[in-house]
Image (tube, rainbow, N blue to C red):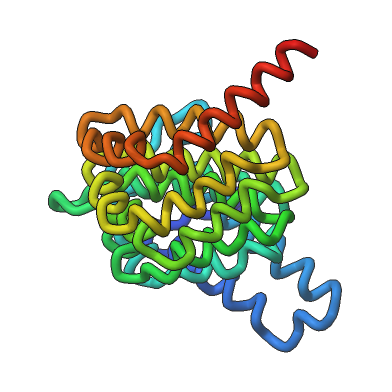
Amino acid sequence: MSFSFFKQSRPKTSQELAKAIKDSLMALDSKTVAEVKALEKALEEVEKNIVTMRTMLSGDGETEPSADQITQLTVEICNEDVISLLFHKLPILGWETRKNLVHCWSILLKQKVDSIFCCVQYMENHLELLDFLVVCYDNKEIALTCGHMLRECIKSPTLAKYILESPSFELFFKFVELPNFDVASDAFSTFKDLLSKHETAVSEFLTAHYDEFFELYEKLLKSANYVTRRQSLKLLSEFLLESPNSHIMKRYIAEIRHLKVMMTLLKVQFNILCL
C-alpha cells in the first residue's frame, strides 16, 4: 500500500514563490473579486504566500534561513515586479499580512547581490513608489504600514535624497498635524528621519531650498498643537547643530523673524511652566 498521500507538499523554490506571490496579487484584479467569497479566497492565497516569504527570509524558529534562497528570492521579486504590486495592493490586504510584509521589506532592502542592493536599485528605478508611500499617510488604514516601509527606504541615502527633493515632501508639513495622533506621530518620525539620517543630503537640500523650507517650518513652530511645537523645536535644534549645517544655522539665527519666533516660544513655554 502506498502512503504517498501522507507526504507534505514540496516547499516552493525562490523562483516559484516569487511567481506565486505575483500571481496571487494579480488575481485580486480579476473580475471575480466582485464576489465576496472569491475575494476572500484570493486574499487568503496572498496571505499564505507572504507568510511563506517571511519564513524563507527569516526562518521558522527551528531552522535558519538559507542565504542562497534569500538572495535568489530578492532577485526574483525585483525581476518579477512584485514590489510594485505589493505596494499598490496594500489598501486591500489584511492587517496581519501587512505586518508580515513590513517585516519582509526590512530584510529585502538589506540584501546585496554582486555589490548591489537589489531592492534599493529597484526603488531607484521606480521612484514613484516612494511618492506613493508618502501619500498613503492620507489613508489611516495603511498609514502606519507605509510609514514603516518608508523609513526602511530612507535608510538609503539616494532614496532619502529623492524624497527631500520631491514635491511630496511638503505633504509632511500637513501630515504631522493630522487629527489622528498615531498617524501624525508616525509621520513626524519619518519627517525626523528625513532631516537627520543623511547629513550631507540634508545640508544640500536646506541650502538649495532655504526660504521655502523655513517658511513652512515656521508654521510648525507656531502650531496651535503644543506637541507639534515642542517636537518641531527639538528637531530644529538637532539638524541645525549638525556640522554640515553650520552655515544654515548662522543664516537662520541672523534673521530677525526667526528670533521673534523663538522669543514667542520662550514666552509660551514660560507661561506653561507658571501654570
Name, please, the residue furthest toward the bottom. Answer: 31
Location of residue 46 in the rendering, given as x and y in whole percent from the top left corner: 62, 62
Question: 174 left or right of 247?
Answer: right
Location of residue 261 in the rendering, given as x and y in whole percent from the top left corner: 53, 37
Q: Is residue 31 above or below residue 96?
A: below
State whether residue 149 appears in this view: yes
Location of residue 36 in the rendering, given as x and y in whole percent from the top left corner: 85, 74
Question: 21 left or right of 72?
Answer: right
Q: Residue at x 30, y 64 (%)?
A: 124
Location of residue 268 in the rendering, given as x and y in whole percent from the top left corner: 67, 26
Residue sitting nearer the eye, 219 or 176 = 219
State whether residue 56 appears in this view: no
Quadrant (top left/top right/bottom left/bottom right) for the C terminus = top right
Name, please, the residue furthest toward the front. Answer: 256
Label tally: 0
Question: 61 left or right of 180?
Answer: left
Name, please, the residue furthest toward the top. Answer: 274
Q: Residue at x 34, y 53 (%)?
A: 210
Name, please, the residue furthest toward the left. Answer: 114
Q: Residue at x 35, y 34 (%)?
A: 253
Residue sitting nearer the eye, 193 or 55 = 193
Q: Residue at x 23, y 33 (%)?
A: 246
Question: 56 left or right of 52?
Answer: left
Q: Is residue 109 above or below residue 259?
A: below
